[in-house]
Image: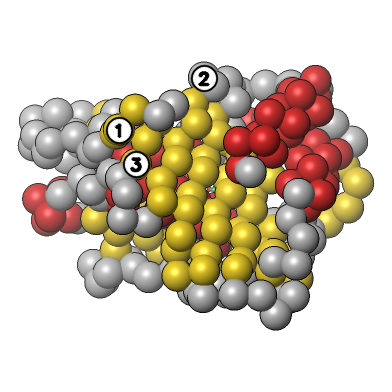
Amino acid sequence: MGKKIIKEVEKEVMPYYGKRGKVIDKNIYGDETSIFDKISEDIALKYLNDVNIISEEIGKIDNGSEWTVVIDPIDGSFNFKIGIPFFAFCFAVFKNDKPYYGLTYDFINKHIYEAYTGKGAYLNNKRIKIKEFDPNNISVCIYAENININAKRVRMLGAFGLEMCLVARGAIDACLDLRPKVRLVDIASSYIICKEAGAIIVNKKKETLNLELDHKKRYDIIVANSKDFLKLI
Ligand code: IPD
Ligand code: CA
Ligand code: CA
């Protein structure tokens, strides 16, 4: 179903890319909802009946189901709006509050990242895994104040869910948000994908980070390829 949704979302939403679409509302976090966020969310909701929903623009709908779907209709809305080609659709399924399936779609590269819990992570149906730690060749995405890390490359790309997938496919070593700002909707799908690709996911105290189906909570998060990386922080 996730793949059906992304096809339709892509067709309806991409015409708005780079065009600063009209702001139509404010979401539950107080951020602007633009027309493209709403169109993407409405398409996803059309496919989902009787399940619980947590989605960035509408918030939480409790239908008393054992299934909960967590959606970020466009992760990287600002990038989308102004034409920076780095944004994604994020879709995660939980069964009885446990991660079950994650899908993160990179529209520009047509990369479908997917994982079922316990069954490995895939990029366009090919198995992916994290990269090996090499202290002389560290690449990392960081959202934090006052962090000093001896990395060769440091980035902040504006779509945290998609940045997590860069760790999953072994492009970079880690991504971190220590401010902390990210919410369940930003990280749920890619959390499942990263875990299945072999990443370690912890909070800033380096304790294992388990997701809670609490749409308001802000997470501090480190997604890394190894314990060796964690020692650098
Ligand atoms: C945002 C992006 C960004 C992160 C913000 C998020 P949005 O998501 O993931 O990288 O730093 O905290 O809110 O608002 O574009 O869906
Ligand atoms: Ca987001
Ligand atoms: Ca969003």
Q: Which mark is residue 109?
A: 2
Q: Position of residue 152 (x, y in %)?
A: 20, 29
Q: Earlier in the sequence, mark 1 or mark 2?
A: 2
Of tags 1 and 2, the one toward the viewer is: 1
What amino acid is found at the position of numbered circle 1 in the picture?
Arg
Task: Kindly tell me whether residue 120 is visible in this rendering.
Answer: yes
- Circle 2 sits in a helix, a strand or a loop, which is it? loop
How many angstroms separate mark 1 from mark 3 (CA)? 6 Å
Kindly identify the residue that appears in the image at 15 percent across and 49 percent down.
226
Relative to the observer, which residue lies in front, 140 or 52? 52
Task: Kindly tell me whether residue 222 is visible in this rendering.
Answer: no
Left/right placement of residue 80 relative to residue 192 reads: right
> To which quarter of the image does residue 230 belong?
bottom left
Q: Which mark is residue 121?
A: 3
Q: Position of residue 42 (x, y in %)?
A: 82, 47
- Circle 1 sits in a helix, a strand or a loop, which is it? strand
Which residue is disc 1 drawn over?
127
Q: Are marks 3 and 2 in contact (CB under 8 Å)?
A: no
Relative to the observer, which residue lies in front, 102 or 233? 102
What amino acid is found at the position of numbered circle 3 in the picture?
Ala
Kindly identify the residue that appears in the image at 63 percent across and 31 percent down.
79
Of tags 3 and 2, the one toward the viewer is: 3
Q: Are marks 1 and 3 in contact (CB under 8 Å)?
A: yes
Q: Quadrant of the N terminus?
A: top right
